[in-house]
Amino acid sequence: MTKRHAALSGLLAASGILFSACAQETAPPEPADEIRIHDEAITLDTHVDISVNYATEAVDPGIDHPRLRVDLVKMEKGGMDGVFLAVFVGNRDDFSPEAYQKAYETAIDRFDSIHRLTETMYPDRCELALTPDDVVRIEKSGKKAIMIGIENGFPIGEDMTRIQEYYDRGARYITLCHSRHNQICDSSGPDEPLHNGISEFGKHVVAEMNRLGIMCDVSHMGEQSFRDLMEISRAPVIASHSGCAALNPHNRNLTDDQLKALAENGGVIQIVALGGFLKAETPEHREAVQKLREELDLPDRRALFRMTPEEREALRPKMEEFERQRRELEKVYPATGLKEMVDHIDHAVKTIGIDHVGIGTDFDGGGGIPGFDNHAEARNVTAELIRRGYSDEDIVKIWGGNLLRVWREVERVASELSVK
């Protein structure tokens, strides 16, 4: 075993990933470096959205589905080992028992669809991972590791027992809010605060998540909510799909001060592959996109988020046509691509170090850029990282090692709290 591969083996072992020295020594010098290190790493994506009717004949993740940027075929083609599928539920400014109940029912439907994928449709090709050890075991078996995150804590309602229920159903992170304020905390979306950070109820939610071993996700949180979470969480946190505000001051991105606080907390930022977060549109591009929305009579993203899942599903044909024409516009205007995504990785690494950076695409929820438009193109990211001088060990950390480290630490904290 070479010195380089010995170091890589040690890193993988530290992350709970077993590395075969024998297999490495007997491997031929080809394929190219990006293929070799990509296949050696455990490649994880921490945020992919799913739709209504997911894991049915209509939306089948077992085929190379034209509507999906992530399915089992594309994962295999791109050498992706695991993905967190998001149980997403939006919310309006309605905190009634009826609104909470409807959100709960929507969440359960999404949980059921993920279990249907792993337990009924394709148990021979993928498996639900509930722990980092599960991820390692499933990857070694040749299957894809499917994990569950909840995007938006709104479906918790005001019932703390639902956090335990969601954990039992497989949720291992919760994005505490989405694009509007909820009962837990203030979002980065609206200008005016509701709670001035995390609410009193939200503090109990965080404590319960720490107790159970559910990762707290800061993506979508307002700055004061973020600061509050750094104070009250006993465990490291993640940003499952975010960018760096220093490169694009979008309200969804983290400032350098937030990045440094995240690193001090022991957490990780998973860099997103969504163009609007990576690079600001030019005025001309923005005007062309707005004109296209108007021609198709399609609401903007904020209005779409306020709709029910059923209302959004009814607009799907228009949304698909909008997406097709929007990509044509990228041929006219400078596009945000893989270079800009890795620029954000570079900035985060330079600001807080290699141990606190990963990848969370937001595919099927807006993500997708030239060069990394779906999971089939994941090796392009590895190739670009190699081109920029990242080592094997660095790439292992970025693609999954850092996330697994944080997850293990969250489990350790939960174990300590359960003893107390």
Image (spheres, rainbow, N blue to C red):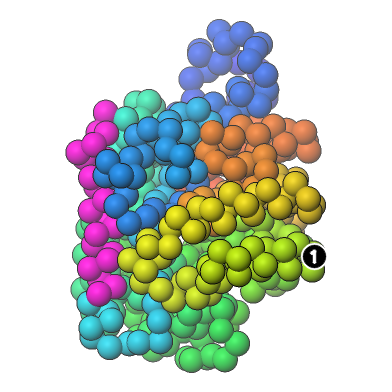
Give the quadrant of the C terminus. bottom left
Q: What residue is shown at x 46% (from left), y 83% (from top)?
A: 181
Of residues 355 and 178, the one nearer the viewer is 178
Image coords of residue 114 (percent x, y): 29, 49
Residue 103 versus residue 353 in the image, above or below: below
Q: Is residue 262 part of the magenta span, yes or no?
A: no
Q: Amino acid at mark 1?
A: Glu
Instruction: Quadrant for residue 415, please give it.
Output: bottom left
Residue 404 versus residue 238 in the image, above or below: above
Is residue 160 something one can see in this rendering? no
Q: What residue is shown at x 78% (from left), y 38% (from top)?
A: 388
Is residue 294 something one can see in this rendering? yes
Residue 64 versus residue 332 in the image, above or below: above
Residue 327 versus residue 122 in the image, above or below: below
What secondary structure characterizes most of the magenta part? helix
Instruction: Quadrant for residue 102, please give it.
Output: bottom left
Q: What residue is shown at x 39% (from left), y 77% (from top)?
A: 91
User: What residue span does the magenta drawing correspond to?
Assistant: 102-124
Give the quadrant of the N terminus. top right
Of residues 167 and 404, the one nearer the viewer is 167
In this picture, residue 65 sits left or right of residue 252: left
Query: 10 Å neighbourhood of mark 1: few (<14), some, or many (≥20)?
Result: few
Of residues 411 and 373, the one nearer the viewer is 373
Image coords of residue 314 (percent x, y): 37, 63
Label 1 SS: helix
Q: What residue is shown at x 41% (from left), y 73% (from top)?
A: 307
In this picture, residue 78 sits left or right of residue 279: left
Image coords of residue 25 (percent x, y): 57, 11
Read off the residue under disc 1.
Answer: 284
Q: Is residue 119 part of the magenta span, yes or no?
A: yes
Image coords of residue 133 (percent x, y): 36, 40
